[in-house]
Image: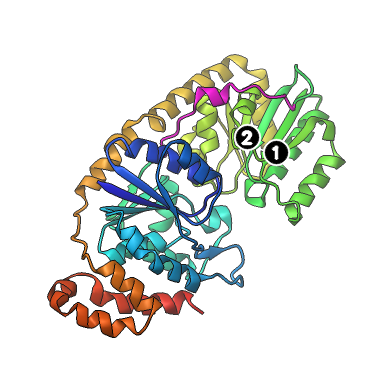
Amino acid sequence: MNIVFFSHTGNMGGAERSLLDLLSSVRKNHHVHVIIPHKGPFEESLDKINIPHTIINYSWWTSTDNTQSNNYSESFGNILKSMTEIQSLTPDIIITNTAVIPWGAIVAKLLNIPHIWNVREFVQKDHQLIPEISFKGLAQFIYEFSDEIFFVSDSVKKEFEKYIPKDKSHVIYSNIKIDPKLANLPIISPFKNKDSFKVTIAASIAPNKDQETAIKAINYLINENYNVELLIIGTQNKGSQYFKEILQLIHQNNSHKIHLRKYRQNPYPYFKLSDAILVCSKSEALSRTIIEAGLLKTPVVVSNRGGNIEIITHQQNGLVYEYGNYQDLAKQIIYYIENKETKNRIIQSNYLSVTTKFSKSKIYESTIPKIISQIKLKDPIPYLASFYQKIFVDTSAIIKENNHLKQENQTIKKSFLFQLWPIYKYFKKLFIK
């Protein structure tokens, strides 16, 4: 089976890393091809494992500011210009990775082939992204334009099912693996005291990741005479107000024991140096960090929000604190410091949990192919791609193509062609301004 994946970026974040894991599993039994919107480290990673890909410039249909202009018309045009190339891949199914782009779903509709939507985020609650058509509209669009929907966690599934039926929904947890070579690469330790209790938080420096509570908890512990250090790793937007506030908070307190580092594509050696990993997010769909820490046998402390509590049960395979409560977070860190035997039991329990739930190849090698095999494949119409391409690029082609396609008329009527114009008008009304 030929499967074409649409990625929302060419960068290398959690969604792209999870997509790489998915591609590595699915390619064992299927031909895969990835479409990405721009060059970047994700493209380089695809090259390293010899996965073919195509670049088509397209935008998201969400933004951090609903007054922000998006190039939907240009994106739609770029997609249509590439229709013949996409159809030449002879895709049987298209899979869209993340909820922030509609293009894979639209291409699948235009080519009359099945579409799976892999929803990996809450959209608004976790990334503060504002959908162009409202969250309810986005959820309904995903439902109408998908044959099946994969949700990354039960928490995300429940959020979307407030607005859509449940009949297409599946929870498919990420298949996460760690290359031992990456975890064992030598690094210079950012920690200054070899005897300190070393704590790390690895996430983009943004309000929803709540580094502020982590810093306050560490300052509280230091003032209580605990020998602790904090490492903050993450993408830095130095112009943002939150980043400035974090810098100020560090400099005003125990800056010699709080270490700030830029984003690392390979954070694993830092995790192995740490005595605990923090996940302080306001609303995490499903944290790769928790799973990766579990695989590396580093204990975690997580906020009681979102997908965190799907993975961690308090004092069984990790510790849970009340979101935003720095004293409660400090209390959980103290628990690890003062209960070494229990800490070791928690580490082993989390390792067993994540290797069973998130790292077994059966997740993708049986569950996903089984669902894919149950999808009724459609009969693509060979002339549709070229017709779509011309009909929007050159209006004079409409008459020519209509004449050319008269013999195909009955076949096309049974396909998706006669739904093309209503969908285009609907899409134009929503996006093209």
Q: Which residue is mark 2?
A: 278
Residue 162 shows up from this direction: no
Name above or below for residue 381 compared with residue 372. Answer: below
The prevailing secondary structure element of the residues shown in magenta is loop
Residue 144 position within the rendered picture, expressed as x and y whole percent measured from the top left: 32, 65
Residue 311 or residue 47, whichever sits in front: 47
Residue 171 position within the rendered picture, expressed as x and y whole percent measured from the top left: 36, 45
Residue 274 shows up from this direction: yes
Left/right placement of residue 315 relative to residue 363 reads right
Q: Are marks 1 and 2 in contact (CB under 8 Å)?
A: yes
In the rendering, which numbered label is found on residue 298?
Answer: none
Residue 129 position within the rendered picture, expressed as x and y whole percent measured from the top left: 56, 60
175 in magenta: yes
Q: Which residue is mark 1?
A: 214
Name above or below for residue 332 compared with residue 34. Answer: above
Name above or below for residue 397 compared with residue 305. Answer: below
Residue 132 or residue 382, whichever sits in front: 382
Identity of the residue drawn at 52% across and 31% down: 292
Identity of the residue drawn at 68% across and 29% down: 199
Residue 377 position within the rendered picture, expressed as x and y whole percent measured from the top left: 20, 55
Give, as a single range, the part of the protein colored magenta. 174-190
- Label whose residue precedes the other's in the sequence (1 or 2): 1
Amino acid, disc 1: Ala
Amino acid, disc 2: Leu
